[in-house]
Amino acid sequence: MHAPSTPIDTPALLLDSARMMRNIADMQQRMDSLGVAFRPHAKTSKSPQVVQRQLEAGARGITVSTLKEAEQFFAAGVDDILYAVAIVPSKFEHAGRLIQAGLRLTLLVESAEGARALSDFGRTRGLVLPVLVEIDTDGHRSGIAPDSPMLLEVARAFSHDAQGGAELHGVLTHAGSSYGLRTDAALAALAEQERAGCVRAAERLRAAGWPCPVVSVGSTPTALRARALDGVTEVRAGVYVFFDLVMAGVGVCALDDIALSVLCTVIGHQPEAGRLITDAGWMAMSRDRGTQKQAHDHGYGLVCDAQGQAIPQLAFNDANQEHGVLQWTGDPGTDLARRFPLGSTLRIVPNHACATGAQHAAYTVSRPDGGHESWPRFNGW
């Protein structure tokens, strides 16, 4: 990373465009080599400018986690979107409006009740809604086990006719427990478990007479460590586009792959306590402390100098809403006010790119010429 050539108001969310583009290219090349379509998860960036670059690299549609994301990206010209959270009746109208406006929006259910309700809604609107069934392949969160009798019960609950309804298009899974793993062997094993479980669910549906053209899997760690994806049609991953400290702790990226950081300013010193105070507290970083469960706890983030070089003697273990409290752990005789003068800048590499990004309204994006520009991002539901 390079220091910005002109002053930036802090705290600011910095995006290294060169690193981001390298991450995009590497993931797309990997998916191409494995023979699957890639549908990146846009919840990480919430930025049309980022998504545009993913699509230009070869992505086929995107994944979202909120209907607001679907609406914003559709307005920006993206017309093939998967809403990868089980939909509930209170959100049917919103989804229906987007589909009627021309968006190819695929929905998700995990119960027969949800499939029946969606089928009924489709008929009331004269729409045939494409739907995936969520499969639980690792016990991480929601979904139906691949061999559960409930899977066929859900399939039987779908119905559509000339008046509309909902149509089963396939199955989806997310091995989110991959975030808790630490070795390539364990990640490869979970990637195979994710693949095999989702393919098994699809095979059961086909054997029972239902077409199942879509088999969708993915998380950033499993996408990067899968050795084969036989039977899978598409992969989803999100945080890979920026990476973060949690992903570095999992072992799927290096520190110099991380494209996101928060620029902050030194606003005070506490020499007796060996502390620096910055203007980036937990409102700038988020309260995510995801590295606490890893081999190295980075507190609220990894402290770096303005060029992005890590300063291991500064620990970011305490924060208030607008104040970051950095503890000096190096030579106690160091003159902190001289080494880190009032008004000097530091960078904080985040634990979780999605959570830190959600604290900001825009990215300050580096350009090859050393300048920077602003890319807006959106938040909320």
Image: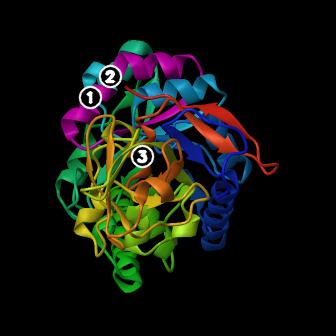
In whole angstroms, how far apart are the C-alphas of marks 2 and 3?
Answer: 23 Å
Residue 96 covered by magenta stretch: yes
> Which residue occupies the extreme bottom position in the image?
185
Q: Are marks 3 and 1 in contact (CB under 8 Å)?
A: no
Q: Which residue is mark 1?
A: 88
Q: Are marks 1 and 2 in contact (CB under 8 Å)?
A: yes
Residue 330 covered by magenta stretch: no
Give the answer, above or below, for where 151 lies relative to 314: above
Which label's residue is closer to the chain start, 3 or 1? 1
Q: What residue do we see at 27% from left, 20% from top?
A: 90
Which label's residue is closer to the chain start, 2 or 3? 2
Give the answer, above or below, for where 363 lies relative to 213: above
Element assignment for label 2: helix
Q: Which residue is mark 2?
A: 91
Amino acid type for the residue under numbered disc 2: Lys
Using the image, tell me which numbered label, if any, was put on residue 333. none
Q: Give how far across and how far down residue 241 sits, in percent.
A: 56, 54
Residues rendered magenta in the picture = 91-118
Neighbor class of circle 1 (other Cα within 10 Å; few <14, some 14-19, many 20+) is some
Neighbor class of circle 2 (other Cα within 10 Å; few <14, some 14-19, many 20+) is few
In whole angstroms, how far apart are the C-alphas of marks 1 and 2?
Answer: 6 Å
Amino acid type for the residue under numbered disc 1: Val
Give the answer, above or below, for where 72 lies relative to 204: above
Decide if residue 168 is on the left or right side of residue 309.
Answer: left
Neighbor class of circle 3 (other Cα within 10 Å; few <14, some 14-19, many 20+) is many
Q: Quadrant of the C terminus?
A: top left
Q: Give how far across and how far down residue 243 sits, in percent.
A: 50, 59
In whole angstroms, how far apart are the C-alphas of marks 3 and 1?
Answer: 24 Å
Comparing 26 with 172, the one in front is 26
Decide if residue 61 is on the left or right side of residue 42.
Answer: right
Q: Give how far across and how far down residue 274 sits, in percent.
A: 30, 59
